[in-house]
Amino acid sequence: MSAPGLAELLERAEALYLDYRLGAVKEWKQRTGGLAIGYMPIYAPRELLHAQGVLPVGLMGGRDDLEIIKGDAYYQSYICHIPRSTIELGLNGSLDALDGMLFPAICDVIRNLSGIWQMQFPDKLSHYLDLPQDFDPEMGGKFYRQDLEHLSELLVQRGARPLTAEALAHSIELYNAERREVQALYELRRLQPWKVPTHELYLVLRAALVLPVEESTAMFRQYHEAVAADQARKPVDQARVVLTGSFCEQPPLGLIKTLERAGCSIVDDDFVQVHRFIRSDIPASDDPLGALVNAFLTDGMASPTRYVDRGRKGDELVQRTKACGAEGLLFCAPSFCDPALLDQPMLVRAVEAEGVPWTAFKYSENSGQFQVIREQAGTFADSIKLWSNA
Amino acid sequence: MSRPDAAVAAASEASKDSSQVRQKEMIARHFDRLAKSKETGEKSAYTFVPGNLSELLLSFDVLPVLPEINALQSAMRGRSAEYISVAEKLGHSEDVCTYVKSDIGMLKSGNVGPTGQRLPDPDLLLLSYTGCFTFMKWFELLQQEYSAPVSMLHVPYQADGKITDAMRTYVVDQLKRKVIPTLEQVTGRAYDEDRLKECLALSAKAEDDLVAVLKSARNRPSPIDSYFGAVYYVGPIFSSFRGTQEAVDYYKALREEIDERVAKKQGPVTPEGEMGAERFRIVVEGPPNWTSFRQFWKMFSDEGAVCVASTYAKVGGMYDLGFRHDPSRPLESLAEYCLGCYTNLSLPTRIDLIVKYLQEYEADGFLINSVKSCNSFSAGQLHILREVEARSGRPGGFIESDLVDPRYFSAANIKNRLESYFQMLQQKSPSSVGLAAAR
Ligand code: SF4
Ligand code: SF4
C-alpha cells in the first residue's frame, strides 16, 4: 500500500482530533460490533481491552471551540478545565458511542469525576483504575492484577470476549509495535526537529487515540516515512526545548504553534503520554497479564502522578533533557493542576542543579489568547540562542 | 486532611469546659515531648491525619507529627499568610493546596510549632496516603528537606463504595512488609503485636464515647455543634492520642459533660459562650476555614444555626457508621480504618451519607463550604449539592473559602450568603423552623 500524501494524512489526523462526536469510533463499532471504552489520561492498559475485542478510546477533554453549557455547573472556577469539558461531552451526547469509561488514578479531580460519571451514566461501565503506588510485584503488582482481572470480567459482562493469554500476547505485540513507531518519531524529532514539527506530531498522536492500534501504527509509520522523505523541510535555527507539565489537560493546538513560532523547537514533551507511558517493549511471556502488570510497575514514566520511591525527583526529566540535547525547559502546566504544579518546584530544583535554563507558564485547554506566552517564550528562546552563540 | 487539636488556640478563650482544658494540657504535653525528643531519644514520625497509624506508632513509642495540624494551627495563630508567602516565593504555585504551602513555609521559617517550641526533624516520614493525592506530593516535597527514611502506604480508593478483600490485603501486605519493618529499623525494636492490640482496645473504647458525643446532636436542642465544635471533640482521636488511656479518659469525661448538657436541654457552647435558641439545624460538608474560624462560627451561631452533623468530622474515621479499631484483627482493622476515612469514599457514597445525616439529625438543610485548596473534597461538590437537594428535598447552600489562606476568606461575602441562606430556610419551612426556635 502506498503511503498517502502528507497533507492528506495530516488532514485526516486533524479531522479525527477535531471530531468530538467520535465518528471513527462509531464506524468501527458498526463494522465490528465491538465495545468501545473511553479512558482518561494518562495511562490505560489498552492491550487488555484490545485482547478482548474492545476499542480503547483516549479522551483528553475539549478545546476552545467547545461551548461549556452544563460542565461549569459541575465545577468551581478553581478546578482545572478538563473535567468540565469531559462532563459536557458526556452530557451533550458526544460520547454516546462509548460503552464505558476508565478513570485512571492520577489525581483527586479524575477520581471524583469517576463518581459523577457513575451517577450520570448508570447504564455505562464506569471503572476507576486504581493504579498502584506501590511497585512491588507482591503488593502493588498483586493488587493491580486483581483490578485488571476485575475489569476484564466487567467487560465480559458487557459482551466483550473473555481474556485469553494468546490474545493478550498478540495485543501486547501490536502495542509494542505502535510504541516503537511513536518512539521512532520522537527520535527523529530529537535528531531533526525541523522534520517533525510538534504541532503536526501532536495531531497524529491525538488522532491515534480513537483508532484501532493496527491503524494507528500504520498512520505513525506513514507519517514518519512522509516527513523523512520531505526534502522541503530544511533545518531551522530554533532553541531546542523540552516541554513538561502537559500530561493531562492538553494545551490548545494554537499554543503549541505559538511556541514554535516564538522560536522554540520542542524536542521532547509529555503530550498524549499513553502512547509512551511504558518506556520499552513489554516482553513476550507465558503470563502476558503478569508482563503487562510488571511493565507498569517497573517501566512506567516518572510522571508527577506516580510516586517516586527510588532515585531523585526530577532525575528522569534531567536525563531526558540531556538525552535530547535540549537547551532549555518549558514548564507548561494547566492552571489548577495539582500533580503538575506540586511537582514543579522539585523539578525546577533538579534542572537548576544541572544549569538548565527554564521558564514556566500555565494554560487552560480553552485558552484563546497566547500573546503573553508568545512574548515569554520568544524572550526565552532568544536568550537561549544568545547564550549558545556566545 | 486536617484536624484540629489546634483549635485549642481558639478554645483557650472560647470555652471553659473541663474537657477542653484537659485537651489543651494533653496537647501541650505532646508538643513538649516532641520538643525534647532529641534529648530524651524519643523518635518522631511525620504522618497525616486520615488513615493515620497512631496505634502502630504508639506500639513502637514513636511520636506523631501531623503537618496538616501544623498548617491549621499556623492559620489559627495568624501565621499562615506569611508562611504561604514564603512558599510561593520559593516557587510553589498559587493554585495548589495551602496546607502544603503553609507547612513548607513554616519549615523554612524555623519549624516552630504551636507551643512556640521547635518541632524535631523526623526520624521517619510515614506517608499513609489515604483520600488525597496531594499527600503524596507533599511527602515528596518533605523528602527533599529531610534525610529520614520514607515509608509509603498506598491506600486504594473505595470507588465502588465498598472495601474489597483485595484492597484490605494490599494494605495489610504493605503494613507487614514495608511499614512495620521500617518502624523496626528506625526504632531498633521488634514489632509487638500484643502492645498494638492493647492500644487498639483503648482506641475502640474512646471511639464508643466519641460516637455517643456526635450522636447527641440528634437531641433538640443539640448540645453540641458538630462542625465547629466537633473540631475540638475529634482532636485527640484523629491524631496523636488514639490508643492511649489519656484519650479514653478524655472521651469519658467529654461524654459525661455532653450527657449533662442533654439532661439540662442546653445547646452548644460557642466561642461567645452559651448559644441562644436553636433556630436551624444544619448538616455541613467540607472543611472549615481556619484563618477566621471564630468569625465563621459566629456567623452561624448569631443566626441560631447549629451544625448537627458534618462530613469534616469524619475525615479521621467513620466511627459513627460503626467502624471500631478491633484488637482481634489488628492489621486488618488498621487497613479498614485507612480505607474508610471520609475523603476515601466515592462521590455517590458521600451523597448517601449527607442524605442520611439530614434524615437522622432532622436537619433543616445543608451547607457546603467549598475550599479552594482541596480537590479531594471540592471537585464534585456542585454535583453533591444538586443530588442531595433532589434526594432529600432539603435546601442546600454553597459558600467558597479556603483552609489556611486568608486571601480567600471574604467575610462580607460569606456572611451575606449565609444570611440569605438562613432567610431562605426560614421561608421554606417556617413551621419547623419556628418549632425549633420555640423549643
Ligand atoms: S489537569 Fe491535572 S488536576 Fe486536572 S484532572 Fe488532569 S491531572 Fe488532575
Ligand atoms: S488537598 Fe485537601 S485532603 Fe489533600 S492535603 Fe490538601 S486539604 Fe488535605
Image (tube, coloured by chain):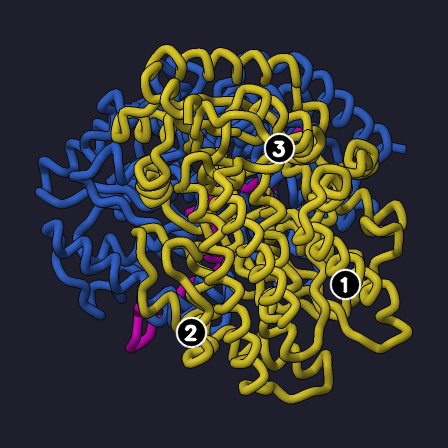
Hey, what amino acid is under mark 3?
Answer: Glu
Q: Nearer the viewer, mark 2 or mark 3?
A: 3
Image coordinates of residue B334 in percent, x first then y, are 48, 69
Write the residue at 65% across / 55% down: A316
The residue pinned by badge 2 equals B332
Image coordinates of residue B429 in percent, x first then y, are 33, 17
Label the yellow chain with its letter. Answer: B
What residue span does the magenta drawing correspond to? A264-289
Which quarter of the image is occupied by the C terminus of chain B? top left
Nearest the viewer among B409 and B421 is: B421
Label 1: chain? B
The residue pinned by badge 3 equals B274
Label 1 CA crowd tier, 10 Å (few <14, some 14–19, many 20+): some
Mark identifier at residue A322:
none
Image coordinates of residue B226 in percent, x first then y, are 51, 41
Majority secondary structure of magenta residues: loop
Do the residues under discs 3 and 1 have CB atoms within 8 angstroms? no
Q: Are marks 1 and 2 on the same chain?
A: yes
Q: Secondary structure at mark 1?
A: helix
The residue pinned by badge 1 equals B30
Write the residue at 44% across / 30% down: B282
Label 3 CA crowd tier, 10 Å (few <14, some 14–19, many 20+): few
Tint of chain A:
blue
Hey, what amino acid is under mark 1?
Answer: His
Real-space CA distance between mark 3 and mark 1, rounded to the nearest whole angstrom: 30 Å
Image coordinates of residue A39 in percent, x first then y, are 33, 43
Please state the quadrant of the image where ligand 2 appears: top right
